[in-house]
Image (cartoon, helix red, strand yellow):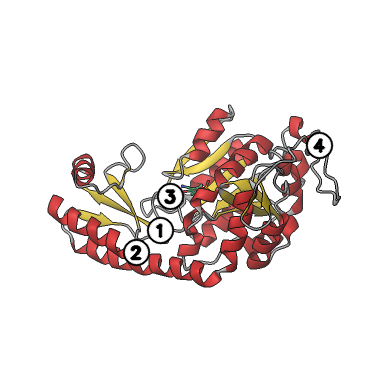
Amino acid sequence: MNIKKLVKPNIQSLRAYQAEEIPCSVKLDANESPYGRKILKSVWTNRYPDPEAKELRKHLAKDLKVKHENLLHGNGSDELISCLIMTFGGPVLYPVPTFSMYGIIAQALNEKTIEIPLDKNFDLDSREFVKVIEKRNPKLIFLSSPNNPTGNCFSEERILKIIRQSKGIVVVDEAYQPFSEKKSFVPLIKKYDNLVVLRTLSKIGLAGLRVGFMAAGSNIINEVNKVRLPFNLNSLSQKVAFDALQDKKQMKSGIASIVSERKKLLKELKKMSGIDPCHSDANFILFRVDDGDSIYGKLLEKGILIRNMKGVAEGCLRVTIGTARENNAFIKSLKQVL
Ligand code: PMP
């Protein structure tokens, strides 16, 4: 696929901002202050961060078994969604309900959006997707799998069909993949040159750092890199994320606890009458209730905050998996409210 041709004309002719890191003993090139404080080991407040986040990208690349040239870092994956839409433009196609930022950013950037409802199992309506792809030729397709807010992964076959059918870029957003037993799409970036896989560290304990990244062929990475702001990932986040990722055992145990708590919570919710919980491959559970507004409000009166999905998934509430203590408090309050 000719990726360059897919890129918006104003971006095609752009050159990425050059902010090379040149080794030196006296650094007087970037209008920084010479007076700074050393925070953590090796992080100086007066210096700009590494624009390429090389250490972090190399570490992430090793974990994902891709080259670091195939990764681009964002200030959260939110930022990369924005960069992708800036680079390729619309129409932007996505199923609904899904993560709202695809539509919000597309609209903010004045790009057309096309929404296709999920089928009754919250899976992709691949026939409708193929029809729309043929008719409207979307430049970008966003598929969140596991999907927020429904929690399920889409069928692998249907995603692959859409990737093969599309003449534009297909973004598989794997924000919640660490909680799923399904395979990641990251290895497939070698096979499909129109595939982008989005990942984030936000759901595995590092949301405050704002670190997201995308994996894709280098043609796509180079184009999207043109619209990325040079110092989008601050030094502290780069360093703390790098250090945190070294402790694989702790990362894994956090994920395992959430998965086991999810199983427990699902079992409890299934036992309650008037509650219809959905299967989840993510760190949250969507459930249908008779009166979402009232249950949401009563839980909040007890200090339990969950998400009312009114207007997104009608009649549904979404609860994030917390610690065992938090989940027990939620279950106890929900029983009282019902
Ligand atoms: N994708 C999906 C599907 C999400 O649910 C979220 C966060 N709610 C994001 C991306 C954004 O994550 P972040 O910007 O924190 O990396």
| 52 vs 7, nearest the viewer | 52
**Amino acid type assigned to the residue bearing label 3 in the image:** Asn
**Amino acid type assigned to the residue bearing label 4 in the image:** Arg
If you read the primary sequence from the N terminus, does the residue marked by circle 4 or circle 2 appear first? 4
Q: CA distance from mark 4 to mark 2?
A: 46 Å
Camera sees residue 253: yes
The residue indicated by pointer 3 is 148
**Amino acid type assigned to the residue bearing label 1 in the image:** Asn
Marks 2,1: beta carbons within 8 A:
yes
If you read the primary sequence from the N terminus, does the residue marked by circle 3 or circle 4 appear first? 4
Residue 297 marker: none
If you read the primary sequence from the N terminus, does the residue marked by circle 2 or circle 3 appear first? 3
Q: Residue furthest top?
A: 110
* SS category of the residue bearing label 4: loop
Q: Position of residue 119 (x, y in %)?
A: 40, 50
| 232 vs 93, nearest the viewer | 232
Within 8 Å of ligand 1, the CB of disc 3? yes
In the image: residue 129, left or right of residue 318 = right
Q: Position of residue 83 (x, y in %)?
A: 64, 39
The residue indicated by pointer 4 is 15
Q: CA distance from mark 4 to mark 1?
A: 39 Å
* SS category of the residue bearing label 3: loop
* SS category of the residue bearing label 1: loop
Residue 283 marker: 1
Residue 262 marker: 2
If you read the primary sequence from the N terminus, does the residue marked by circle 1 or circle 3 appear first? 3
Indicate whether 14 appears above or below 169: above
In the image: residue 173, left or right of residue 307 = right
Q: Residue at x 32, y 57 (%)?
A: 278
